Amino acid sequence: MTRYRIIIVVLIVLAELATGCEKSQRERHPEKAFGQQELQIGLIPEQNVFRQRERYQVLKKYFFDRLGITVNFTSLSRYGNITEHFSYEKMDGAFFGSFTYALAHRQLGVEPLVRPVNLDGTSTYHGYVFVRKDSGIRTAADMKRRRFAFVDRATLAGYLFPLAYFKVNGISNPHAFLGESFFAGSHDAAILAVLNKEADIGAAKNTIYDQMSAENPRIEKELVILAASGVVPQNCLAVRKDLDPELKKALQQALLDMDKNDEGTEALRRFGARGFIETRDSDYEYLYTLSRQVGIDLKTYRYENK
Amino acid sequence: MKKRILIGFGSLLLIFLTGSLIAVVYITKTTQRMDRLILLHQVEILREDLIIHVQQVQSNIFRNKTRSGGDVDVLVAHVQEMDKVMDSCVGCHHTPELTQGLLGMRDMANDYKTAISRLVTASANPTKIAALERRAQDLGQELITMTQGMAFAANVRLQQKTQETMATIREVRTVLCGTLLLGFLLALVATVVLAKSLDGRLRKLLEAIRRISRGELQHRVDINDSPGSEFRELGEAFNVMTRNLHQSQRQLVQSAKLAAIGELATNIAYEVNNPLTGVLGYTGLLLKSDDIPADKKEHLKTIERETLRAREILKNLLDFARRRPPLLVKTEVRSLVQDTLESINGQARPTNVKIITECTDGLPAVAVDPDEMKNVFLNLINNAFFAMPSGGTFRIRCLHDRDVTGKEVVVVEFIDAGVGIPESQLDKIFDPFFTTRLEGDGIGLGLSISYMIVQNHGGRIEVESKVGEGSTFRVYLPV
């Protein structure tokens, strides 16, 4: 009889333990009734698209462990029109560049949540206008009938800032002023175009310029920076406006809390960032100012990268 | 024999162990070769996988005209697959040249990946994009060519390895078959030798048992194995058993003979004694008579003397037949022997017989009738003297021993160096009236009486003799 009692007690204890485990599991994955349990987040391909994919897999796991939701990261091609891709591919959000964010915000109403802080403590970037040292160009006026390598139509550093630079220097129609201009297609391509004498002037973001300069001493030796822009947020996560507000909040909080818990710290180490900071639309004020300066209406701006 | 059986089985074990060891070594060698071959095949599969993945990536680049996000995802996934295969190729152990080649391939794959990254991150400038696309595709094609080249080299190596492995398998087959056959033959030889050596000895024992059962109790088995061997011990034990059996049978026969003869002698003595008394009475009367001439009286005296001799014989016979129970007294055998020897001092004996007595103190005392036992010893000593007309050494030894049943006995041995007793007479020497002496020198009752006396003491007399060497009489007396 006593043996049966012992067995019953043991079973009860085990059942309690099992329930306890379940509870803690639930606490870990709060299955809140978010509007959806799966998210599509777009990534604009970076210089090393494969490393980028590995990094974001870390965030995918973190989101699942933290919120119990599945985040699918998928590429968001800049080729063509990025806002169209966003709508067409039914994205819930994306890690945008500053210009693409501004476009998506104005045209689709996406809302910024957070952006990563790089390991060196930066979370912003700026644009450069640079020339070959042997080109003899030192001012905007010297650029007359010279060759200019832009990046593409939807970049701050590679297009918007140089246009503003010309504007400030009294050149309202740069395409007519310059001898030749083309879109290099990427920041490194624009830098290389100038380095390889395919263009005399170029524009690119400082992060790529500095990185390439560290790798290739020719850049420092042969190029010179004529102008630098103001700063704008880099790589910000923005979500569609009609996303469940609670989910929006949860996503933002999960990323903001990353450096405050062990699993988040470990994930950050593997992701290659110090943490995430809150990002507001007002952080893009410099960009909005530039676009107004050069007369680009972001709400109606249509472009087609080719 | 145990040693032989152990050696036999040990050699069998050794043969099979050696065979198994050779088999294991060769099987291990073969499986290692097979493993290497399988590994090479797996590597080959990996290479093919790699080519397929690179081709998929190439096809993605080619198809990537629309450059939608989904296409980039597929491209990235395929490159990641390609990377995995590449990692497993580089991760394997190879010869330094091959490792060098694989590292070159890895560098090329990295260049390929960089070109692809450039392509997917390019957002404008169709000319540049086309150039980037061409660059990526060229690198991809180069990677395929390189992988195919390495695959070709690997195929040559694979063929070579396959041939080597096949040769090893053939060699292993020959060695294993040879080992098996040799092991079997050696085992057969060992078994036959072992069985034969066992069989020969068992046959000898079986033959001896058959002869004993036929009544040939004097037969002895002869096994000439080295001392300490089980079969030799068995043969010796068998011989001891047969000898004891023979002795017992002799004693039984002797006892029966003596009983029958005793009874007959008693009857005859009674019957003959009365007429002899008459003969003696009348002879006495005739001798006292005066009318018989003196020369006739001489005849009468001869009749009286011979009749008296006949009566003496009859008295001896009655004494033999009517054995009274011995008066047992605890006696030291040594003093018995000494007393007996002293009593013969006055007797005539061969002058050149040397008597050696080996009876020490410390022997257990025996319960005997001293007079009777002295008679027995005297008889045996006299017989020995008789057997040694030309002299020699006569030994008397006293021993403390155990008989076959394990009882304590004192053995008195009388060892002469006389003429010996022929084998044919050995069974008869204890028979009454059996004598080899001249008529008048004895009537042949001495040994019979001695035998009876010792038997009445619960002991026995045994004899061993060889013609020309001498005889040994052993008197066993229970302690």
Image (cartoon, coloured by chain):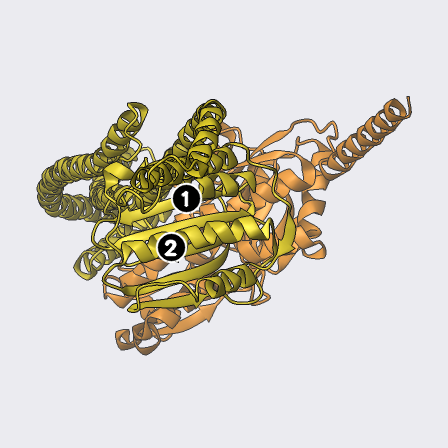
Secondary structure beneath dot 1 equals helix
Amino acid tagged 2: Asn
Check the rendered structure and report the hue given to chain B: yellow
Note whether B452 is above or below A255 in the view shown: above
**Closer to the camera in the image, A228 or B450:** B450
Left or right: A76 as drawn, with respect to A286 = left
Q: Residue at x 48, y 62 (%)?
A: B343
User: Few, some or many C-alpha atoms within 10 Å of disc 1 (few <14, some 14-19, many ≥20)?
Assistant: many
Examine the rendering and report whether any part of residue B61 can be seen.
no
User: Which circle marks residue A55 in the picture?
Assistant: none
**Residue shown at the point (43%, 61%) measured from the top left:** B397
In the displayed structure, B14 sits above or below B427; it is below
Residue A65, percent across and down? 65, 40
Tell which circle, 1 or 2, labels the residue nearer the N-terminal end. 2
Q: Which residue is mark 2?
A: B382
Q: Position of residue A182 (x, y in %)?
A: 30, 53
- Specify the quadrant of the image occupied by residue B145: top left
**Can the viewer see residue B189?**
yes
Return the residue at label 1: B446
Q: Colour of chain A?
A: orange
Give the chain letter at badge 2: B
Q: CA distance from mark 1 to mark 2?
A: 10 Å
> Residue B268: x, y in percent?
44, 24
Quadrant including the N terminus of chain B: top left
**Relative depth, front residue between B221 and A89:** B221
Q: How many marks?
A: 2
